[in-house]
Image: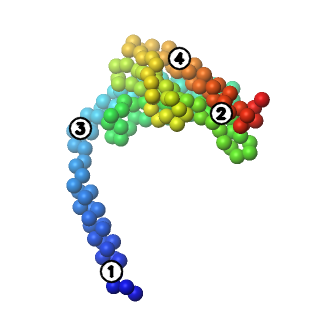
Amino acid sequence: MSGFDFRKMAADAKAAMEERKGELEPVPKKARAEREHYASLAAKPLLDGILPLLEKASKDFSDEGIISIITTDFEADRNADRDPQIKFQCKGPRRESDGWQFEARAVFFTSNGSRVRLGVGDHGFSRKPDRIIAEDKNGNVEGLVRIGLERAIEFYMEEYEKNRSKIGGK
């Protein structure tokens, strides 16, 4: 065999990696705790007001044959630059041949604790709102959810029309 010591190469690489890991300054505990506290307060209107309404809507939509998904993102440590959010998105019926289904543009509800914003994605794959279309500072989340769900259905119908030949619709 050759004169290479593969174990030594791997051990040296591992030691260098561990050394670099130690150089990374972890987020100070106080700053992390402050961010977690902020995220907890900011998420409260979403958890108490928005999410229950969206869960009911998702069930009702499903009863009528419209698939929807709800995604929450309250991770304070991962998203220090973003407020907590809930994403609501409708999906089309599955194509029988291969299970493909379209994804409509999503609506997003974000909160900083004092106001809740409604945003929309410009694409079916948007992970955060590309545009804010409404906001509430007075606790009228029902109105905001109604507007959001109307937009979600509008986006669903747009995608359905674009893709109905692909899913076997007439």
156 or 145: which is nearer to us? Answer: 156
113 or 91: which is nearer to us? Answer: 91
Q: Quadrant of the C terminus?
A: top right
Mark before the other along the chain sequence, 2 or 3: 3
Label 4 belongs to which residue?
A: 147
| 10 Å crowding of disc 1: few (<14), some (14-19), many (20+) | few
Q: CA distance from mark 2 to mark 3?
A: 42 Å
Mark 1 or 3: in front is: 1
Q: Compared to 76, does 118 lie above or below?
A: above
Label 3 belongs to which residue?
A: 31
Q: Compared to 22, does 56 lie above or below?
A: above
Mark before the other along the chain sequence, 1 or 3: 1
Q: CA distance from mark 4 to mark 2?
A: 21 Å
Q: Secondary structure at mark 1?
A: loop
Left or right relative to 161: residue 86:
left
Q: Secondary structure at mark 2?
A: loop
User: How many numbered marks are there?
Assistant: 4
Q: Which residue is at the far bottom?
A: 1
Tell me the kind of residue under disc 1: Asp
Tell me the kind of residue under disc 2: Gly
Query: Residue 138: which quarter of the image?
Result: top left
Label 2 belongs to which residue?
A: 92
Label 1 belongs to which residue?
A: 5
